[in-house]
Image (tube, rainbow, N blue to C red):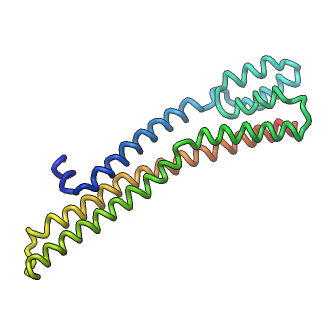
Amino acid sequence: MFNLFLKGGPLMWPILLCSLVSVTIVLERYYYFYRLRGRIPNICPRVKLLLKEGREDEAVRLCEQDGGPVGRILAISAHIRHKPAEEREKLISRAGSKIVRQMEQYLRALAVIVNTATLLGLLGTVTGMIKAFMKIQELGGRVDASVLAGGIWEALITTAAGLFVAIPTMLFYHYFESKVDNTADSMKEAAMEFLEG
């Protein structure tokens, strides 16, 4: 396997680095989203009911037990519910934006890795083909397949390696993006319901 890696040429090393960074980010984000999930179902109506009954401390405690972004938004909403509507909206919007930024952390790096790995694979293809054509020129046009094999190997291996890194990274990038979008929508709905109620 390592011999195959080496046959891909020097561009295999940056592709390997891309794959290591990608795996690290994917594992970190997966663990982050796993910890971020809410633990209390239908939290919004329960918090609203507690606040209607004047049990603000219990409502805030319930939000903190949830641990998810919706719970955090509701906890903030509960703390500032006596402020004017416009000020509440600004504070909730600011808190929501901060949570979304935390969820999106490192996702841009995944997008960069997708493009970089693909381009490195393409660059490997080009350099491999250049080597193959240089060999053809050295041989004066007398093509010997065994002599050309080295350049073609490099071309094919780097292309495959670049795509092997880029494709799963792209899938995980879109998966995490959809998690961010769904969570942001849930937070928005909870905040709107709270502000209107």
Number of numbered discs overlaid on the protein picture? 0
**Is 116 situated above or below 60?**
below
Picture quarter with the C terminus: top right
Residue 106's x, y, as percent? 52, 43
Residue at 77% across, 30% down? 76
Q: Identify the residue at the far bottom of this view.
A: 141
Residue at 75% across, 27% down? 75
Q: Report the front residue among 26 and 128.
A: 128
In the picture provided, is 171 more to the left or to the right than 41?
left
Residue at 56% across, 48% down? 177
Res 124 quadrant in image: bottom left
**Is 106 situated above or below 64?**
below
In the picture provided, is 42 more to the left or to the right than 155?
right
Q: Report the front residue among 186 and 89.
A: 89
Residue 113's x, y, as percent? 43, 52
Residue 15's x, y, as percent? 33, 52
Res 9 quadrant in image: bottom left
Residue at 21% across, 51% down? 5
Res 144 quadrant in image: bottom left
In the picture provided, is 177 more to the left or to the right than 79?
left
Residue 163's x, y, as percent? 35, 57
Q: Report the front residue among 32 and 105.
A: 105
